[in-house]
Amino acid sequence: MSGQASSAVVLGADEKYEIAVSYGTIIATGALAILVCGTRLCTRMFLLNTFGIDDWACLVGLAFVTVFNGIGLAVVYYGAGKHIEHVSQEHLSKWFMLYYVCICMYLSISFAVKSSILLFLRRVFPATYIQRATLGMIVFLVLFTISGTFVAAFQCNPPKYAVAYGIFMYQAVVIFACDIVMFLLPFPVLLKLQLSPARRFALLAVFGSGVVACVAPAVRFRSLNFYKTGSSDTTFVGASSLYWMAIEYNMGLVAGSLPGLQPLFKRFGIFGTTNDATGPSSRKNPQFSPSYQLEDHSSKNWGSGRRGKGSKNRYQGESVLDATVMGERSSQESDEARIVKTQVFTLTHETNDHPSETKPPSWGTFNAKYR
């Protein structure tokens, strides 16, 4: 732990590898998160002219994750990836201070990322089970984050939390379980969509990108073994845990923002139109909307056949209609949703009176509406 100045130390190949992977992973995934989330937020604000609570949550999550990425780069600079005997005392003290900050921020950043995804799912999918499941998860994660953060910030003396394998593993398992639940939630709804195979694959691939965020916490299980073994070379063996945390956070934001780019993709023809469904159900059932038409379902008139004036022509582009997915719209509502055609007929009334007594013809006009 003592050490020579870090500038005079010749690093081994394993140290150079860990440092390079740490820098590369944090910078690459952080840049990707900024690009994808920034594009999603700009699409919502400027293309759709709307900005919901899930967008604000995404913005807050991106800010938290970007701060973590900056701290992560500082952690690498001050010794992560190096063997502890190759880290100077000055750098080691700063490394431990930043390490403590990361521990305190860990659950808060995780909650910021997951809450943005859960709020997005609540807006996109009106299915009852998704609404209830996401709300329950938000409440659970609030309690879990508060309790875990207090344990981390107000450690006992000596601070056993910093080296307690059981606590870290417990948190990692809970976060991994939440990731799996969030990843699987929309698939029962998505599988009911009547789409061409290409469109179905594209939509499932976009929502399925969250599998990367699920893999990261699973891999982190292995990186936590140094807590179990009691290794004193924490600066070297803890580097992998650092960059896998960065992957988890950044890719979580990316996975949660990719579906929000659908309106932008559709404008460039990547998803095509929303009326390209195939199959007998889309041709035979006039009550079934044949595509994954997307629309904001936050209106109070959700599920009714008509919209209020406030929501007329309002398109936010992100919600799967219940008629599209669930097929619950009644025939009356379906009829009301069709285009109204208007024709004008003119009737002439003739009389047999004497020409001198002929009155001006009377004209009647009426409008007949046909559906």
Image (cartoon, grey):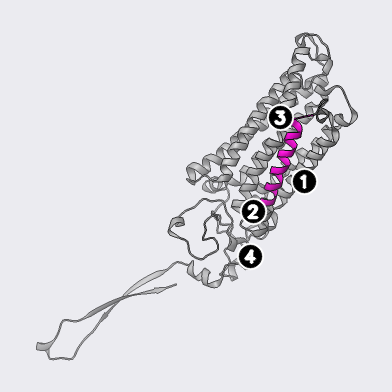
Residue 295 sits above or below residue 219 on the image: below
How busy is the neighbourhood of tag 4: few (under 14 within 10 Å), some, or many (20 plus)?
few
Q: Who's the residue at 81% across and 26% down the image?
A: 157
Identity of the amino acid at label 2? Answer: Ala
Q: Which residue has dot 4 on it?
A: 279
Disc nearer the start of the sequence (4/1): 1
Identity of the amino acid at label 3? Answer: Thr
Q: Which residue has dot 3 on it?
A: 25
Q: Quarter of the image containing the C terminus?
A: bottom left
Between the residue at mark 4 and the residue at mark 3, the CA separation in whole angstroms equals: 44 Å
**Residue 143 percent location from the top left of the image:** 71, 43
Q: Which residue has dot 1 on it?
A: 177
In front here: 48 or 141? 141
Q: Secondary structure at mark 3?
A: helix
Does the magenta-highlighted stretch encompass residue 42?
A: no
- The stretch of residues the image draws in magenta is 135-155
